[in-house]
Amino acid sequence: METISLLEDILIRRQTLSGGWSFFGSSQVSVEATCLALLAVGSLTPESGNHRLDWLLGRQQRDGSWPAFLGDRESSWTTALALSVLNVMSDVVPARERAFQWLLKEHGREANWLWQWKFRIADRNVRFNPAMYGWPWSVGAASWVIPTAFSLVAIKQFTACKRVVDAEKRIQLGVGMLLDRACPGGGWNSGNNVVYGVPLRPHVEATAIALLALQDEEPVSAVGAGLAWLKKSARTTRSAESLAWSILTLFLYQEPIEDLKSSLAMIVGEGTGVPNNSTLATSLLALKCGRMIHPFAVLR
Amino acid sequence: MKLDRRRFLGSAAGLAATATVAANRIWPKYSVSYKKSSSRVAVLNASGYSETLDGLLLDGLWLFGLCVTGKTVLLKPNLVEDLPGPVNTNANIIGAAARCFLRLGAARVVIGEGPGHQRDTELIVQAAGLKPHLADRRIEFVDLNRDELVRVKLKANYSGLGELWLPRSVLDSDFVVSMPKVKTHHWAGVTLSLKNMFGIVPGMKYGWPKNLLHWHGIHESILDICATVPIHFVIADGITAMEGNGPLQGTARELGKIVLADDPVAADATCARLMGFDPLRVQHLSEAGRFLGNLRADRITMLAESLEAPIRPFAVLPDFHYLLARTDM
């Protein structure tokens, strides 16, 4: 408990004067770092109610999206993360609705029939089904696992009470994409599972985040294999970021996490050795797992 | 003379090719040129990643008479994933390079990398064994995927991107050293000092992988990046290299070489020749020879070992058989 308070203090002190958080202490605020920090310590900052979200709400663009960082104007995957923050922390409906609508419209470039044709006929070195598309990191790129997973979580949370047809369609496509991109031995990497006929290795963080998005789906074999791989890999992971995401996911799958939390607490220590604010925030969320509302839980 | 269909098409194609060549000469796609009258390359023999690397590397660097006194030196290694095998630039050679530049008078050394596949940079740094080399307070690691960014107009226009957001740590450094692992690459043919600069493009803006660059062309993006952020020196880790299905799943190839160069094109051309490839057949390298450095062997002065053809060329995927040099080196 004392460790958590200490880490919370450090993260709050690292908030920039403008109200958000950067990754490593510069004045260039990152939407990702800010979203994770808000989830971790937003309720402890001096601002009250929705004011604690002023920075985030103030950076939403006209089309409903968020850029990746202060100074950039292009829409980015961080919109999904921002929507999750608002789903958990805010009752500002118009901002959430606009973010949701932007996510519904955004898709990986391979969604276009011309590119689907290219990937089916001419460019087959990477094994994937282009008909199953999700969300890109940045506008104009293809779909990848992590932005797709965060988009699915955000949309599922936002539509928990009433899921419209368009949302259901995108969810099905996104889930299909994740299942299609699963690594043959279980788990996920950035999104290329087999290249030139050779299976690629999964990554801990990508696997954990992909499983977050599949938490309420049928436990098909890819989910089971991914979960088994994550449970095994998390035990030997010595990096705070990967371990924190593993804890957040394993908790939702009702797997034991106390030993992993102890390992994470050891790695993070007093927090001064974790200069990356997004890692510190994710670690805090993981250490507080079970004692607060899980920010990426999907309720149906 | 009667103009039949075949003649017409042949003439049209010839005219188009001539027009393209002429257009490239009149309106080149680059606004800078780093090409010197001649470049220097030193190929050092090294049997492994032992503690003698510091001495070997320092002797090699002396050959170039580099002036880095008081400068901030950026070392850009190739750290890709936390995989075993010759995937990443070996940490011992990175650490040795950092210490050597400090001994040559550098004020500080920044080791900067933005891995393209895994978001957890700390995990990769740990797995690569780089941590022990960061003990000196003048040697710092910067995660280029999450550094402060500056919007920069590109100094070449092959990709059509026009501009990129690039890390301040890169732009503020005085002396950029590309430190690739010598590997084959399943999209680009080879990954050497020029391709290695993909890693300066920040994931926080362009994602993991930096997929927007792929859509704009890998070779084209490499040229634009290297025109915009000039490489001042190259230290290529070819001690244990990778052949076959690189950059991740290839097999180890004991080459036993470290390649130093004051010109990235000359460095990559030399590495390609050591791999048994014709540098002219590597698309980005061939084009880079027009403005980023010297490709031709007669423009490259070898300072140490002479260049020898490999007994057996590096294995490549079938799509890249065209890279193999015929007989000439």
Image (spheres, coloured by chain):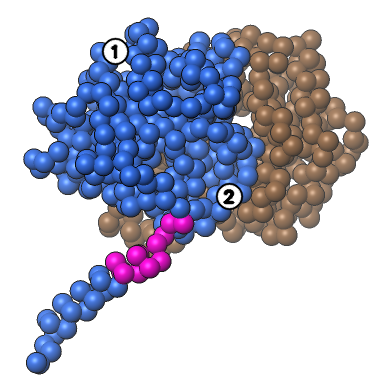
Chain colours: A brown, B blue
| Residue at 81% across, 20% down | A9
Instruction: Quickly name the residue at label 1.
Output: B48
User: Dot 1, how many residues are within 10 Å of its Cα: few (below 14), some (14-19), or many (20+)?
Assistant: some
Kindly tell me whether residue B2 is visible in this rendering. Answer: yes
Name the kind of residue labelled 2 in the image: Val
In-image side of B276 versus B23 (left or right): left
| Residue at 21% across, 41% down | B298
Kind of element beneath mark 2: strand
Which residue is most to the top? Answer: B51
Residue A79 image offset from top left, x and y in percent: 66, 47
Q: Earlier in the sequence, mark 2 or mark 1?
A: 1
Q: Is B24 covered by the magenta stretch?
A: yes
**Chain letter belonging to callout 1:** B
Q: Are marks 2 and 1 on the same chain?
A: yes
In-image side of A185 versus A49 (left or right): left
Residue A291 image offset from top left, x and y in percent: 75, 20
Name the kind of residue labelled 1 in the image: Gly
- The quarter of the displayed image where residue B275 is located: top left
Instruction: Quickly name the residue at label 2.
Output: B152
Q: Which residues are magenta?
A: B20-31
Residue A43 image offset from top left, x and y in percent: 83, 30
- Which mark is drawn over residue B214? none
In-image side of A92 versus B167 (left or right): right
> A109 or A261, which lies in front?
A109
Kindly tell me whether residue B181 is visible in this rendering. Answer: no
**Chain letter belonging to callout 2:** B
| Residue at 38% across, 22% down | B61
